Image (spheres, rainbow, N blue to C red):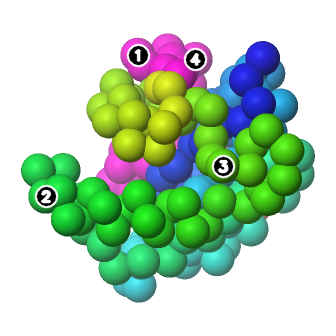
Amino acid sequence: MHHSGLIIGRFDPPHLGHSYMIEWAQQRCTEVVVFVNTKQGEAVPGHLRAQWLQELHPAAHVVQVEHNLHNDWDDQDLWARWIELLQSKWPITSGPSAKGPEVVVSSDFYIAELARRLGAQPLICDPERAHVPISATLIRNDPATHLELLAPQVRNWVERNWLNM
């Protein structure tokens, strides 16, 4: 069992695949931190995404991480800014997890570099997305087709705001 795990993403919108990963991480980590990356102008407001994830996973530490950073993984200065931001948002202040995550959990193998820079190990969950075959991009592109893969509060918001139901 790992002391702490970090899951980081936009969760735009949160779906049952995200919930599967959080629950999977909770079975392997004493404490799980979920960073919800947010910027102005995203499809679903960041505060709602963080609120929904906290409601769905009350044992997790859900933190909204507002920023205006982009992703250019060849830019070492940008990497340094990302790491500084993420370390500044780490919510656990005592015990073995106070210095940061022991593992970074994702379904994507590219998380290995982020884990390394945070002094953690990557922990890959269902890379084929076999347990819940969905992505937030698929939902944003065709929400009506994927409503059954959303938690009730997310589904209600999507129906009201994207499908005008």
Element assignment for label 1? loop
Residue at x 74% of width, y 50% of height: 98
Magenta residue span:
123-147
In 3D space, how far apart are the residues under numbered discs 3 and 2 (Cα atoms)? 25 Å
Where residue 145 sits: x, y (%)? 46, 44
Where does the image place residue 55, in percent across and percent down from the top left? 84, 58
What percent of the width, then of the height, locates residue 132? 56, 25
Q: CA distance from mark 1 to mark 4?
A: 8 Å
Determine crowd level at label 1: few under 14, some 14-19, many 20+ residues with C-alpha closer than 10 A.
few
Residue 99 is labelled as 3
Work out which quarter of the rendered image holds the C terminus and state it.
bottom right
The residue carrying mark 2 is 75
Q: Earlier in the sequence, mark 3 or mark 2?
A: 2
Residue tagged by mark 4? 131
User: Mark 1 = which residue?
Assistant: 128
Q: Residue at 51% x, 61% y: name it.
A: 86
Quick one: SS at disc 3?
Answer: loop
In primary-sequence order, the first of circles 2 and 1 is 2
Calculate the distance from the C-alpha at mark 2 to the C-alpha at mark 1. Answer: 29 Å
